[in-house]
Image (tube, coloured by chain):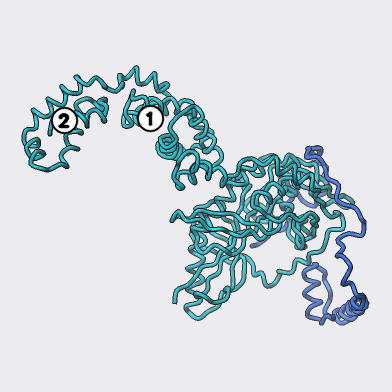
Chain colours: A blue, B cyan
Amino acid sequence: MSLDNKKVKEIAHLARLNIEDSDIEQATAELNNILSLMDKLGEIDTGDAEPMAHPLKMSQRLREDKVLEDDLSEEFQAIAPKTGKGHFLVPTVIE
Amino acid sequence: MTWETVIGLEIHSQLRTKSKIFSGASTAFGSKANTQACAVDLGFPGVLPVLNEEVVKMALRFGLSVDAAINKHSIFARKNYFYPDLPKGYQISQFEIPIVGQGSIEITLESGDNKTVGITRAHLEEDAGKSIHDLYDDYTAIDLNRAGTPLLEIVSEPDMSSAKEAVAYAKKIHALVQYIEICDGNMQEGSFRCDANVSVRKQGEELGTRSELKNINSFKFLEKAINIEVERQIDILEEGGSVVQETRLYDSIKNETRSMRSKEEANDYRYFPDPDLLPVVISDELLEEIKKELPELPTEKKIRFIDSLGLSSYDAEVLTSQKEMADYFENIIKQGADAKLSANWVMGDLSAALNKSQLEIVDSPISSGELFLLISRITDNTISGKIAKDVFKLMWDGKGTADEIIEKQGLKQMTDSSAIESIIDDVIENNPGQVQQFKDGNSKLLGFFIGQVMKASKGKANPKQVNEILNEKLS
């Protein structure tokens, strides 16, 4: 598997990474290097192996349905770039 | 060539837990903005999600109610996208292995026929916060109280072929989630939200390109939105164009759908298993325990109403469409009232009065016990069904119990044969022309005589006796 410049640009956009046009060539080459290492893994026969979702052989612990959190909104708002009347404010989102 | 509509629904139902799916913050609706958003909900660095056990149980209740395959081993995944009301930059959802697999549910169509709708899957996920666009000119305001509220997303197969069928399915799921007490079903508050995937095709052809309709917050709008979207797609195709796969918002004021954003650009959510969450494992014991706790489901209740109470399929469907209505009806029956008569009262006068006052049945000013009393006064011949309607109106207006009103207004039915007979004699004497016509074979006039007698008795004569005596006297 390998990527072209266009695909790398798309992925950068999805991840909100700002890659200059002059750097795309290098980014694509580096990513393709990593992908070729992944291809090595593909050579292993995994027909009998069960898919793994997590490296730990444990299952999810569950929490009792109880309200435990206090209202810390003032502390959280104090470190936000902009707030108003209890809301976090962000640049206008146009739909 | 006729067009065929294909509809699948994605229903997000908020699970009615006390705390959020991955944090101990409260899920109560209507609190001051951001006072219920804790560090986990805000996506602070270093926090870890811990799964709420009640959420898992609720998903299993749903799965068992729709005969679904339960995945005893399910995985949470990250769905990556950027939006201000999603602080982490990803939504924790389930992708490859949802907790509830393939199931199905039966819906009743307008024709009275049943249809089975497939349920593809139901998965657990967290809700996002709320963006408020109209509070400021230069900013969007964000309230993250809703962020992290547990959702069960129920995905149907594209099995519905009209807006009406889609509504019937949505209503069925709506009733079910309330029966099994996993969701309050409040559509105004957004606890139950429907997105519709709509496409059209010529009969027998492959599936057409679909659009996804969002922003639908009532069953009425669901029907309207689908119908208007189907029209739009057919117009495009008949003019030789092609439908674009996209998300469209329904505008209920203009009754139109509008393109929201093209899915082609950002449809890559780059799902991957969330490393912060281990696989969820469901034990046989837990599953067994939940199976035992399940209440009687709407379909089971409907069958019981038909089989043991002798109700029609239609009546049973209406009465079981809402748990509260079924409970109200059953309270009347338990006290010994006639099932069919009680069904008529609950679905007729009571439902009409509730609708008119925009009340839910739990807020009815007439309790099931009070309505039982009224119904039993009809069956014991104290009053006629017609007078009962007037008594009902007075009861609704808080003028007293059925017995009090009957007593106070002197509405007791006249069952004294000689008194009825004398009224009938008067009517016959005063209408010689009609009597002659009746005797000449115009049997339709019997209704006229009954009407006159009822009028003269102010509606209090027992209709059955009137009928008998009249027939006797006129023959």
Crowd around label 2: few <14 · some 14–19 · many ≥20 (10 Å): few
Residue B350 visible in image: no
Observer-nearest residue: B362 or A31?
B362
Location of residue B203 in the rendering, given as x and y in whole percent from the top left corner: 50, 74
Q: Residue at x 88, y 59 (%)?
A: A54
Residue B388: where, in percent of width, then height?
35, 29
**Label 1 and label 2 in one chain:** yes
The residue to which callout 2 is attached is B472
Q: Residue at x 8, y 29 (%)?
A: B430
User: Could you tell me the amino acid type at mark 2?
Assistant: Glu
Q: Position of residue B248 (x, y in %)?
A: 59, 64
Q: Amino acid at mark 1?
A: Lys
Left/right of residue B372 with respect to residue B155 in the rendered view: left
- Quarter in which the N terminus of chain A is drawn: bottom right
From the viewer's perspective, is residue B315 above or below residue B120?
Answer: above
Mark seen at residue B326: none
The quadrant in which residue B451 appears is top left
Rendered-image quadrant of the C terminus of chain A: bottom right
Q: Classify mark 2: helix, strand or loop.
A: helix
Asked if disc 1 and disc 2 are in contact, CB closer than 8 Å, the reply is no
Q: Position of residue B316 (x, y in %)?
A: 48, 44
The residue marked by circle 1 belongs to what chain? B
Chain designation of label 2: B
Say which of B347 and B191 sits in front: B347
Q: Which mark is residue B393?
A: 1
The image shows residue B225, relative to residue B179, as above or below, that is: below
Locate residue B289: give its quadrant.
top right
Residue B62 seen from this side: yes
**Which of the two residues, B260 or B91, is positioned nearer the viewer here?**
B91
Say whether residue B156 is left or right of residue B368: right
Q: Closer to the camera: disc 1 or disc 2?
A: 2
Number of residues whose C-alpha sits closer than 10 Å to that of mark 1, classed few (under 14), some (14–19) or many (20 or more): some
